[in-house]
């Protein structure tokens, strides 16, 4: 099979892949919606398609971050952006952890665990975006 070199055909191919992805995602959401109606939320999350949908959404989010960092028109200081994001994440995680620990039926341990999980889940995309911005800054300085 020959590699496609015509940019118009490559763009058409990417549009076709996007349409197929949208249809596939709508099908998965339809099946999960049917499970949610028939079996409830617990039955829906037990379906293996739920895991496929979650993994696909996370990967799509990370790929979108990569293209959005490349699309940024103004130069953003990666370290300053990282520090601001870290402060915001710490504040949000602390507030959520405190509110969970103050909720009836939950202990301080529950608040620390949920705040820690929230911090880690928010930290991963922030560090990934920082790395993308540093790499882009290095590529621009080499040119």
Image (tube, rainbow, N blue to C red):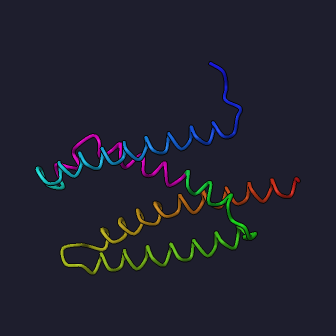
Residue 40 quadrant: bottom left
Q: Nearer the viewer, residue 2 or 116?
A: 2
Residue 117 quadrant: bottom left
Q: Residue furthest left?
A: 38
Was residue 70 drawn as part of the magenta stretch in this picture? no
Relative to 139, 106 lies left or right: left
Q: Nearer the viewer, residue 77 or 56?
A: 56
What range is drawn magenta here?
Answer: 42-62
Q: In the rendering, at what x and y percent does residue 128 appear?
A: 60, 56
Q: Quadrant of the N terminus?
A: top right
- Tell me the chief SS of the magenta region: helix
Q: In the rendering, at what x and y percent does residue 63 appear?
A: 56, 50
Q: In the rendering, at what x and y percent does residue 104 appear?
A: 19, 78
Above or below, 13 against 77 in this view is: above
Above or below, 138 against 23 in this view is: below
Q: Residue at x 80, y 56 (%)?
A: 138
Above or below, 102 against 9 in this view is: below
Q: In the rendering, at what x and y percent does residue 84 appear?
A: 61, 76
Q: Nearer the viewer, residue 92 or 113?
A: 92
């Amino acid at each position: 099979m020959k590699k496609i070199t015509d940019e118009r055909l490559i763009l058409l191919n990417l549009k076709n892949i996007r349409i197929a992805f949208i249809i596939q995602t709508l099908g998965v959401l339809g099946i999960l919606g049917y499970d949610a109606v028939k079996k409830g939320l617990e039955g829906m999350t037990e379906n293996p398609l739920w895991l496929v949908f979650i993994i696909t959404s996370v990967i799509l989010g990370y790929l979108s971050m990569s293209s959005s960092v490349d699309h940024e028109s103004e130069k953003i200081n990666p370290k300053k952006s990282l520090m601001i994001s870290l402060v915001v994440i710490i504040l949000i995680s602390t507030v959520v952890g405190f509110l969970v620990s103050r909720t009836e039926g939950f202990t301080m341990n529950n608040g620390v665990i949920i705040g820690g999980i929230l911090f880690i889940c928010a930290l991963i995309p922030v560090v990934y975006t920082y790395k993308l911005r540093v790499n882009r800054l290095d590529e621009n300085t080499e040119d």
